[in-house]
Each structure stands twice: as structure tokens, then as C-alpha cells.
Image (cartoon, rainbow, N blue to C red):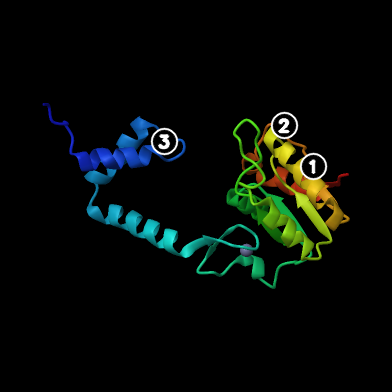
Amino acid sequence: MTKNYLPKELMRLVESFSKLPGIGQATASRLALYLMRKPPDLSLEIAKSLIEARKKVKSCPNCNNFMFDNDCSCSDSSRQSDILCIVENTVDVISVENSGEYNGQYHVLQGLLSISQGINPKDLKINQLINRIKNSEFKEIILATDPTSDGEFTAQYIHEKIKPYCLLITRIAIGVPIGSEVNYIDKNTLAKSIVDRRKIG
Ligand SMILES: [Zn+2]
């Protein structure tokens, strides 16, 4: 029987990397071999941050964003508490923050509803969002999901569900090519799409 040409521990590392999104077999091999060639400090640093982050970073039960050590920015009293911006993921929070046009609350869906990919309201904890809205007094709720078909579908679905609990529901102005993703829109375009948001329904 022929023995594998490479140590199985190294092959296991390649396999682990290849489970990450956007990383194929070739990139996974490159990453694993890169780490093996570098001094061990880098591998230890990555392993340590990963273990630490997995241990202490959790989903906030209120806004569904990531929080460290049970301390979430949604309880930051310097932010406006009566306006809510619903986004697909944490990268979008960073984009909206960078636009400099918003200082309210966020709700992070951690995904979009998708019929083709079988992602349903339960997967996105939509009930948690509805309960949050029911128990808060938001003067305005901004639906800031991408202008893609899944983003539009998600915005429409949420709009229907939250309509009874908020008088002003707005959608970011889609002054950008249809199909763009919120985090690919440049800072000025996103800032403008927030400023130019319009009432729906
Ligand atoms: Zn939170």
C-alpha cells in the first residue's frame, strides 16, 4: 500500500481551510504551506485569536450582531435609540457606520431569505426581530438589505411583518446598479442612499 506523500496532519489542515467560503483546494494548500514555512508564532497567534474569539464573541440576543464578553454596542447610550436599521450582516454595519450618516440602532439578520437556497424566516430569527420591534418604540425602521432579488424579497417580507408596529418604515434609496451589495457600494453612495431613503408601504 502506498503511503500518502504528505503528512496526514498537513492534509487535515488543508482540508480544514478548504471548508471556508471562497477557499478552494489550491488556496487551502497555499495557506497551509505558507504557515508551515513561517516561524510558529504566526500559527500560534492565529490559533489563539480563533479560540479566544470563538469563546468570547457571541450573538447578541437583542440585535443579533456579534458582541464580545456580553457587551454589545446596542446598549450604548450615546446612540439614538428610536431608529433601527436592518442589515444583512456585520460587514454592512461597518459600511453604514463608515458612511457617517447614521447613529441609531442595528438589527443584523446574518443572512437573507432565499427560496433558491432554502433560507427561511426561522434561520434568520425573524421572530426575535419582530419581538424586539414590538417591545421598543422605534420612530423609524430602515430596511437596508441589498438591492438584489434576495435582498428585496427579505425587505418585503420583513416590511409585511413589522408594518403593524411602526409608522415609518423606509428603504435605502437604490441609486446604485441593481444587483449591487451594500458592502460593495462606496462610502458616498451609501451615505446618499441613507440620506435619500424613502417611505414604503
Ligand atoms: Zn446587541
Residue pointed to by mark 2 = 177
Please indicate whether residue 187 sits to the left or right of residue 35 in the image.
Answer: right
Image quadrant where residue 183 sits: top right
The reply to whether residue 45 is in sight is yes
Query: Does 15 appear above or below 194?
Result: above
Please indicate whether residue 26 sits to the left or right of residue 72 in the image.
Answer: left
Residue placed at 71% from the left, 61% from the top? 105
Instruction: Identify the element where label 3 is drawn.
Output: loop
Q: For label 1, count other residues whose C-alpha is less than 10 Å away and answer few (under 14), some (14-19) or many (20+).
A: some
At label 1, the amino acid type is Ala
Taking depth in this image into account, of 128 and 50 the one nearest to the observer is 128
Of tags 1 and 3, which is closer to the observer?
3
Q: Position of residue 57 (x, y in %)?
A: 49, 62
Residue pointed to by mark 1 = 173
Taking depth in this image into account, of 73 and 41 the one nearest to the observer is 73
At label 3, the amino acid type is Ile
Residue pointed to by mark 3 = 23
Q: Quadrant of the C terminus?
A: top right
Residue placed at 72% from the left, 43% from the top? 189
Q: Seen from this angle, which residue lies furthest bottom? A: 77
Residue placed at 33% from the left, 55% from the top? 47
Q: Position of residue 166 (x, y in %)?
A: 85, 57
Mark 2 CB near ligand 1 (8 Å cut): no
Mark 1 CB near ligand 1 (8 Å cut): no
Label 2–label 1 contact, CB within 8 A = no
Q: Seen from this angle, which residue lies furthest top? A: 1
Please indicate whether residue 24 sits to the left or right of residue 102 in the image.
Answer: left
